Amino acid sequence: MKKNLHLIRHPLVQHKLTLMRRKSTSVTEFRELVGEVAMLMAYEVTKDLPLTKAKIQTPMETMMSPVLQGEKMVLVPILRAGMGLLDGMLRIFPSARVAHIGIYRDHKTLEPVEYYFKASKTLRGRDLILLDPMLATGNSAIAATDRLKGAHPRSIRFMCLVSAPEGVRAFQKAHPDVPVYTAAIDRKLNAHGYILPGLGDAGDRIFGTL
Ligand code: URA
């Protein structure tokens, strides 16, 4: 596997992703599944976060015990489909901060257009996790990462569910230093920038706008 590309093969993730891919899966089921997969992937995505030790008091005695080191992490969903991954991640990291980035794909050019960005002023030195279920052309994720790097975070990780090989290549070329965590690398993109076999339009399936 390429450096900085992490394919998450955990059986529960794979099984739930199969359920999500099915055309017959309802909006309610899809929404639940995307949250569950996000929670399961959270472990892998954050497995190398730095730890430090804090002095705590157990009921028995004091001890130095591991805690996450640094400022609160920041979750960055790319609107709108990235919102589907947010709740699951917040279940695992309830005190994480959230920065929203709105990028849409121009349907003709497939180029990214940023229309919204709202983040705390203090992204500097923080660990960021960019969230988008689909890595298709890679254009949105590349543009979002460009924007986030400008805020000088300590680290950026990109978490998605389904990737196209074209998107992985483009993202890794633009941001070789940013690790990509994905549950699947599918066959290819179609002429409209959709992933095959994919799961369709993730935003439509999460929000019921089919
Ligand atoms: N975005 C989606 O939601 N699905 C795709 O297949 C590609 C981009």
Image (cartoon, grey):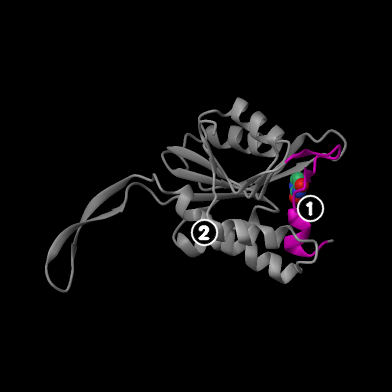
Residue drawn at x 55%, y 58% is 11
Q: Amino acid at mark 2?
A: Leu
Residue 134's x, y, as percent? 69, 47
Residue drawn at x 72%, y 62% is 206
Residue drawn at x 71%, y 71% is 28
Where 186 sits versus 62, above or below? above
Q: Residue furthest top?
A: 173
Considering the image in quadrants, where does the N terminus appear?
top right
* Residue bearing mark 1: 200
Residue 199's x, y, as percent? 75, 53
Residue 20's x, y, as percent? 70, 60
Compute the Cα span from label 1 to label 2: 22 Å
Image quarter of residue 5: top right
Is residue 161 found inside the magenta-colored segment of the image?
no
Element on which disc 1 rests: loop
Between 193 and 141, the residue placed more toward the observer is 193
Relative horizontal placement of residue 92, taking residue 182 as reference (left or right): left
Residue 115's x, y, as percent? 72, 43
Element on which disc 2 rests: helix
Confirm or deny contact between disc 1 and disc 2 (CB under 8 A). no
Is residue 193 found inside the magenta-colored segment of the image?
yes
Relative horizontal placement of residue 77, taking residue 70 as reference (left or right): right
Mark 1, ligand 1, within 8 Å: the answer is yes
Q: Amino acid at mark 1?
A: Gly
* Residue bearing mark 2: 40
Q: Residue furthest left?
A: 61
Task: Write down the region rendered in magenta.
Answer: 187-209
Is residue 41 at all visible to an observer of this figure?
Answer: yes
Considering the image in quadrants, where does the C terminus appear?
bottom right
